[in-house]
Amino acid sequence: MSALEAPVTALKGIGEALAAKLVRLGVASVADLLFHLPLRYQDRTHVTPIATLRAGLEAVVEGEVAASEVVQGRRRSLLVRLRDGSGILSLRFFHFSPAQQQQFRPGTRVRAFGEARAGATGLELYHPEYRLLGGAAPPVEDHLTPIYPTTEGLHQSRLRALVEQALAQLDDDPQALPDWLPEALRARFDLPELHHCLAVLHRPPPDIDPELLASGRHPASRRLALEELLAHHLSLREVRLRIQADGAPALPAGRGLQARFLTQLPFSLTGAQRRVLDEIAADLARTTPMLRLVQGDVGSGKTVVAAMAALAAIAGDCQAAMMAPTEILAEQHYRTFQAWFAPLGIEVAWLSGKLKGKVRLDAKAAILDGRARMVVGTHALFQGDVHFQRLGLAIIDEQHRFGVHQRLALREKGEAGGLTPHQLVMTATPIPRTLAMSAYADLDVSVIDELPPGRTPVTTVAVPDERRPEVVARIRHACAEGRQAYWVCTLIEESEVLQCQAAEATRDELAEALPELAIGLVHGRMKATEKAAVMDAFKAGELDLLVATTVIEVGVDVPNASLMIIENPERLGLSQLHQLRGRVGRGSTESYCVLLYHGPLSAHSRERLSVMRETTDGFRIAEKDLELRGPGEVLGTRQTGLAQMKIADLERDADLLERVASLADALLASRPEASRPLIRRWLGEEAGRYGQV
Ligand code: ADP
Ligand code: MG
């Protein structure tokens, strides 16, 4: 073990108490201190003439005390007037001792550091750090002063001294912290050397570009950010390798079952669905576990693809499980699968967190003894008390709602049977390719890039809420013609309670304005059975208008609904709007989406709504979303652990993400042994866990 890998307690003056504080900062080893980077810097490398100071600037000034007095303002304070050749300013102390008062005799030379503010006497430094100068002035700092993120009870100067100790150890033994990126690779990707980066960031030279440094765009920061992204990427690849080292049941296409299923479907598959199914079939036929992401726009028909894959598992004498992120979506899938599979003699089980008592026990028993060949549910499927007889395929719908760990947890479910299940992950969030390669490095990607025929594109209009009566008239008109409509309520507050209340109020108001219509309401606080009853009634055409919170966002399928009103669309992200809008335009009638906004709109909101008006292409919308909100938001924060990064910032470093996959390829080709230590360096213990789940 190198000295840098030692726990921080190996450093001078660090006991258990201090070590515990450091742990709060994510610092356990001496090397961790090196990667604990400053938040910002102070420039104490030169003395600033008083005349050139501006409010808001932090600076070192030096001068002679012209006068000092205790003044009675709103608060009593000690005011010291300090003069240099260029001008005069005040140092102001609200807390001061009599001894301090004595120090500032006229003529005394003082050097002070602080932030200049516009005060009662002109520019003032409040509670500056200062020292009295005797004879010759001591030299100023030779590099910028780092300000580290710290924690309660750990003083900045203490932390700084600890980092200095770690840097000194590194200077003594540069080999102790290897640069895992070989020189040839650094040259090719134009990356500075690791030690140089750390030195620059902990002790920036005075002539460094301060803007570049502050914005995190200095080559030294960029190199570390790239290395961190690389480590995450490598860990995902590692996960993939470990999973694929296990055996999976070979599931050749279950021709008979699948063919019977297809003949009972009221439509034939699109070319894109068939192509993706071929890719899946090839994976399933192998004895290494499939790890595949199917990306397909809202309404592209991912559920049928999932069903076909499930049938391959079932024909191969295994069980298949499908997990969806919300109760309402999971339940809809359950009913779809039941309708599809019951005629084939396949028992479908349902499991959700809300399922209790005997029903739950029965479901679990059917899953364990293998009666249930197909299981649909929410993340309740992950729970420790759920055991499968022989899980061959795990399908995860709307992947963007789940984290990588949840996804990996499903793997364990097959292990009782001695196999690792194949995994099929489905998402409607189109992820630009380069991003997908980094964020989903553990998955192969298939794309359903074609919508089923007969869909009519949705016409989208933006209408200010003053014109609400017109919109209501439009609903009346559409429903009079036998069509159905959605009214979606959104609320800024995260509070589900408020959101549901708002939806109830809207329902009442619309019921009054449209007495001739049958109006239903669904929101997140209703019981699953209540929600299901309302959705069923809407699907059966017994309700004309469905008022809903954003719970209908994913997966609800009612082809006769051809009008959707989204209230306050400016509160939602583009991808979410796109998902919502995808609920209409599923039948053959021309469909409309009305974005009923509350003006005045910011330029940003206006731009987003106009994107929605201009295109229904999910891919373009996702790209625009990425541009406007950044990848962190688009992918969802829980995504791949990419949100918990130390240095990299997905928004700022989006362009680095694009280089990660090729950098990883190059590294694995030239120095494969670097992968593990890099993962450990950046993900720490986490890395171990990734592999185990
Ligand atoms: P998503 O990809 O958003 O999950 P779904 O699987 O819910 O889409 O499919 C949307 C609708 O399109 C469903 O009613 C489904 O039955 C129908 N559908 C799927 N594939 C086809 C097809 N090839 N032809 C016609 N309709 C289809
Ligand atoms: Mg779906």
Image: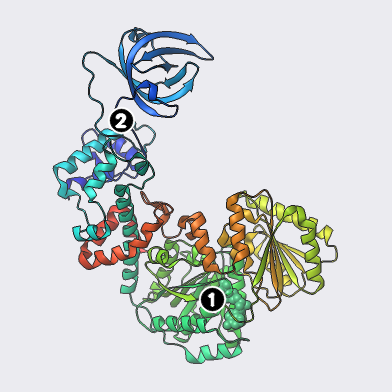
Give the number of the disc on residue 157: 2
Query: How many numbered marks are there?
Result: 2
| Residue 264 occupies quadrant | bottom right
Q: Secondary structure at mark 1?
A: helix
- Residue 21 to residue 247: above or below: above
- Residue 265 to residue 593: above or below: below
| Residue 139 occupies quadrant | top left
Task: Give whichever of discs 1 and 2 has the lower sequence position.
Answer: 2
Q: Position of residue 14 (x, y in %)?
A: 25, 35
Q: Tell me the kind of residue under disc 2.
A: Ser
Q: Is mark 1 within 8 Å of ligand 1?
A: yes
Q: Is mark 2 within 8 Å of ligand 2?
A: no
Q: Position of residue 494 (x, y in %)?
A: 60, 50
Residue situated furthest bottom in the rendering: 256
Does residue 389 appear in this view? Answer: no
Give the Cα distance between marks 1 and 2.
57 Å
Q: Is residue 276 left or right of residue 578?
A: left
Does residue 660 appear in this view? Answer: yes
Kindly identify the residue that appears in the image at 82 percent across and 71 percent down. Answer: 480
Residue located beneath label 1 in the image: 302
Quarter holding the C terminus is bottom left
Kindly identify the residue that appears in the image at 41 percent across and 57 percent down. Answer: 654
Q: Secondary structure at mark 2?
A: helix
Disc 1 and disc 2 in contact, CB within 8 angstroms: no
- Residue 256 to residue 392: above or below: below
Q: Position of residue 36 (x, y in %)?
A: 31, 43
Kindly identify the residue that appears in the image at 73 percent across and 67 percent down. Answer: 485
Q: Position of residue 393 (x, y in %)?
A: 45, 77
Residue situated furthest right in the rendering: 516
Q: Tell me the kind of residue under disc 1.
A: Lys
